Amino acid sequence: MLTGAGGALATAVAQELVDAGAELILVGRGESLKRAEDRVPATEVLDLDLSDPASIEELRRHKVDALVHTVGAYGMQDAHKATPDDLNGMMTANMTTLFHAVQGVLPHMLKQKEGMIVGVSAAQAARMSGKGAALYTASKAAVAAYVLSLHDELKGKGVRGCVVYPMGAIDTPTNREAGMTWEATIDPRGMAQSIAHALTRPPRAHLTELKIYPDV
């Protein structure tokens, strides 16, 4: 199951996994999901708002071996100007959506005694500091702590977790428009290959954390 379908990273991950022979369930919203559906062969396509707890029951209707969660949002604000709405927005986009996705896929994984959960965190969370983006950093640190905690709790039951830290901006049209150069950003297809690698590791050689860097 791939969430955030249609996004730049999710598109690269989808193509990498399809090339590897995976059968995909795409989860997304609106036009982004439609673009993904047009580009990527999928066994299921689910238009769901993962910030809504009702999404859990819909996800539980599907048998999932691995979850790659790419849903998220970035935000900056001066610490003294941050509002409760800013906090709720960052935690909902980055942590609540992951929680709902995990709650949706876990019952089947536990039943079959095998599964993998991949969450995308951030460089700021890896460094535990994000100047000008404290709430974003905190929400992405929550993603990492949650996935690693799940791993330690559930690995004895066959379910493992892996946190991916992009240690820089990903090469997307939006970041290009913002003036970022290709060498200063992370190749999304290369990042997708790293995620695919993590998904295929055996239990006795598993990966729980991946830091992925740009060239500079």
Image (spheres, grey):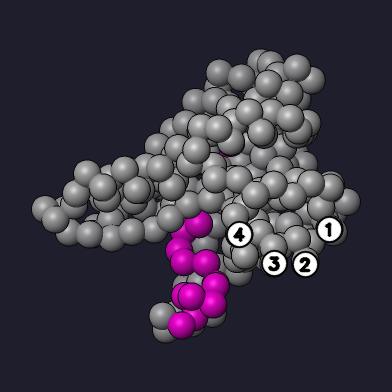
Q: Which amino acid type corresponds to the residue marked 1 in the rendered image?
A: Pro
Residue at label 1? 41
Which disc is residue 39 wearing? 2
Q: Earlier in the sequence, mark 4 or mark 1?
A: 4
Mark before the other along the chain sequence, 3 or 1: 3
Find the distance from the CA under tag 4 to the CA under tag 2.
15 Å
Q: Given contact means CB atoms under 8 Å apart, are the residues at marks 4 and 3 in contact?
A: no
CA–CA distance between discs 3 and 1?
11 Å
- Which percent across, then down, holds residue 34? 69, 63
Give, as a three-letter code, the residue at label 3.
Answer: Arg
Q: Position of residue 58 (x, y in %)?
A: 66, 33
Q: Is residue 203 above or below residue 200?
A: above
Rendered view: 212 above or below 142: below
Q: What residue did someone put label 3 on?
A: 35
Q: Position of residue 51 (x, y in %)?
A: 48, 41
Element class at badge 4: helix
Of badges 4 and 3, the one in the foreground is 4
**Callout 3–callout 2 Cβ contact below 8 Å:** yes
